[in-house]
Image (tube, rainbow, N blue to C red):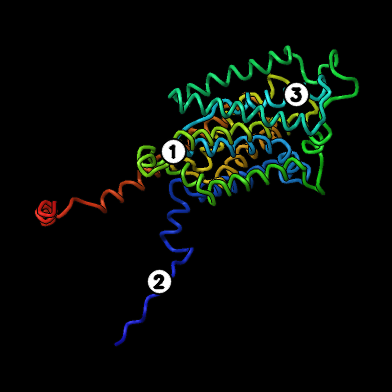
Amino acid sequence: MFSQPQSTARSPFSSASLARFFGAGGLGGPIIMLVVLVVLLWFLSNGTFVSSNNLVNILKQFSVPLILAMGQTLVVITGGIDLSVASTAALSACFMGIMYTQVGMDGWLALLLGIVTGLVVGFLNGFVITQWRVPDFVATLGALTAVRGVALIITDGYPVPNFGVAIPGRTMPEPVQWLGSGMIGPIPAIAFVAAVLVFITWLVLNRTTLGRRLIAIGGNAEAARIAGINVRRTKLYAYLIAGGMAAFGGILMAGRLDSANGLMAPAMELTTIAAVVLGGTALAGGEGRVGGTVIGVAILAALSNGLNILGVSSFWQDVVTGLVVVLVVALDQFRRRLSRKPARNAQGPAPESQVPAEAGAR
C-alpha cells in the first residue's frame, strides 16, 4: 500500500551516464577503438607490439606529440586552431641549442630562453588573432612557414650543434639530454615530463577560471563577452600556453636526439590536431577533454608503431592514418547530429495557452 521512496542518487552506470560516455564527444568510443587496435596489433605481431621494449619505444616517440597536443587542445576548445606548434618546437630547440653551443650560455639558462621563445611565438599568434582580427587558421598558417623560416635562418640550415662554429665538446645541455633520453626506473624521463604537463593542462581546464572561460568562449564567444569574459585576453592565454607547450616539446625532442634543426618535427601539427579530434574535442569549440586527447595520441601512436612492426610502407601508413582520422570524425559528427535531434524533439512547440499570458506580462 505504501510506495517505496525513490533514491535521488544517480548511479554512474545509469542509462544517461552511459549515453554521455559513449555518445558524441564521450570517451567511450575512443577507448573502445584503442582497445580493439591494441588487441589486433598484439595478435598480428605475435606479441611483439606489447613487449616492454616496444612500449618504452612508444613512450619515447610520442611523448613530444602528446605535449604539443595539450596546447592544441586548449586552443581548439576555444574554437581556434594552431598550425604553428611544430614550427615553434623547432625554433625553440634551435635557439636553445645555439645559445648553449655557440654563445656558451649556461645549460639551464639556455633551456629557459628556449621556453621563452615558444611563449613569444604563442603571444604573437594570439595578438594577431585577437587584435588584428586575422582568422586563426590564416594567422597560424602564416606562422607555420615564417617561424620555421626563422629557425632555418638562425641555423643557416645546419643542424645544431654546428661543429664548425660550436664550442668544442658542447652538444645539448645536460639537463635537456637527461630529460629527453634518461630513464627513471623502467620509464623514460620524457614520459614523466609529458605526464606532468598533461596533469597541469587538466588542472587548467577543469579547476581554474581560465579553463571555464576557454570552454565558454568556444561554446558561444558573444554570450561569453556579454557575461563579462574578456574574450580577446582569454584566447591570447590559450595561444600563449600552446606556444609554451610547443617549446617544451621541441626542447625534449632535441634532448632525445642530442641535436636540433630547423626542419625537426615535420607535420607534427597535423598529428596534434588529429589526436585532439580523435579524442572527441569538437573542432567548433566549446567541448573537449584532456583525457580524450591522451587517448587520441595513444591511438595514433599504436597505429604508427604497429604498422612499422608489421612492415607496412610509410606511404601506406599515411593513407591508413588519414582514413582513420576522417572516418572517426565522420562517425563523431553523425553521433552529434543524432544527439541533437531528440533534444529538439523533446522541446516541441510552446503551448498556445502560454502566448497570451506572456504577452500580458510584458
Residue type at mark 1 is Asn
User: What residue do we see at 57% from left, 32% from top?
Assistant: 321
Viewed as shown, does residue 94 lie left or right of 290?
right
Foreground tag (1 vs 3): 1
Residue pointed to by mark 3 = 260
Q: Earlier in the sequence, mark 1 or mark 3?
A: 1
Dot 1 falls on a residue whose secondary structure is loop
The quarter of the picture where residue 303 lies is: top right
On the image, the x and y values in percent for residue 253 come to 73, 31
Residue 230 got which mark?
1
On the image, the x and y values in percent for residue 310 come to 69, 34
Residue type at mark 2 is Thr
Q: Earlier in the sequence, mark 3 or mark 2?
A: 2
Dot 2 falls on a residue whose secondary structure is loop
Q: Residues within 10 Å of mark 2 (few under 14, many from 20)?
A: few
Residue type at mark 3 is Ala
Residue pointed to by mark 2 = 8
In three-dimensional space, the C-alpha distance between marks 1 and 3, rounded to whole angstroms, equals 38 Å
Q: Residue farthest to the right?
A: 169
